[in-house]
Image: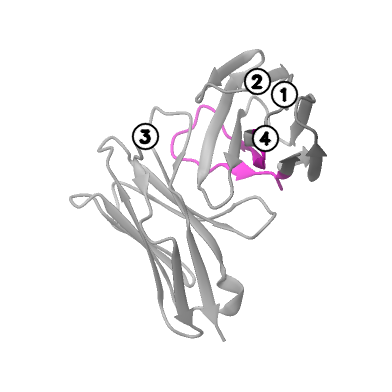
Amino acid sequence: DQQVKQNSPSLSVQEGRISILNCDYTNSMFDYFLWYKKYPAEGPTFLISISSIKDKNEDGRFTVFLNKSAKHLSLHIVPSQPGDSAVYFCAASTGSARQLTFGSGTQLTVLP
Amino acid sequence: SQTIHQWPATLVQPVGSPLSLECTVEGTSNPNLYWYRQAAGRGLQLLFYSVGIGQISSEVPQNLSASRPQDRQFILSSKKLLLSDSGFYLCAWRAAGRMNTEAFFGQGTRLTVV
């Protein structure tokens, strides 16, 4: 049972445009959400997170939006750059859980 | 600052051979430690996590085991590797006793079982 789902395995965007990566979850107990970026043959690196008490969090070019009623979050990258090309994972956690539950990832390709 | 070391970076092992992957964390005490696996084209699957020395929780029953002999050392082992054990193995740590924190990953080990 996948509790965190990323239904788009890949996304291509033109340089300078907006990239929107989506993530859905089923466990209503999740209250903390994260996005990670992963290059091939490297470990994931943390990008940005959001608590369930918020619906938006910004950090530079990256913004995460959370829609609790829809159990949906998204990551917006504006403007997209070729160096953003990587696999993006969303992850979720409950307050009491010790582990993060990850989605299956979306490969983002930013075309120059 | 905290750092996490994972080795080796790549490993090619024959079927039936043993496995030992090691992970150490510096700059923090009593971290929660994790082993994840990324199979080809798949997401991150949690294999084991540990909240303290000698305390191991297994998420997926399989051919692997984990041990935590010291506070900041986490080891992934197998007595006899299977072809299906091939994948990219990742160690991670997360601060214990704090809610809503991120996990930090090592650089990963690419294991190919032949």
Picture mark count: 4
Pointer 1 residue: B77
Estimate the spatial distance between the alpha carbons at disc 4 and disc 2, rounded to whole Å.
Answer: 16 Å
The verdict on a common chain for dots 3 and 4 is no
Q: Position of residue B28 (x, y in %)?
A: 69, 33
Q: Is mark 1 on a helix, strand or loop?
A: strand
SS for dot 3 = loop
Q: Which of marks 4 and 1 is nearer the N terminus?
A: 1
What is the spatial separation of the Cα atoms under label 1 and label 2, in whole angstroms? 5 Å
SS type, badge 2: strand
Q: Residue A94 carries which label?
A: 3
Nearer the camera: disc 3 or disc 1:
1
Give me the chain letter of mark 4: B
Q: Of label 4 and label 2, which has the lower sequence position? A: 2
At horizontal 39% and vertical 47% (from top left) the residue drawn is: A33
Q: Name the residue under label 4.
A: B83
Q: Residues within 10 Å of mark 1 (few under 14, many from 20)?
A: some
Residue named by callout 2? B65
Image quadrant in which the C terminus of chain A is located: bottom right
| Lower position in the chain sequence, tag 1 or tag 2 | 2
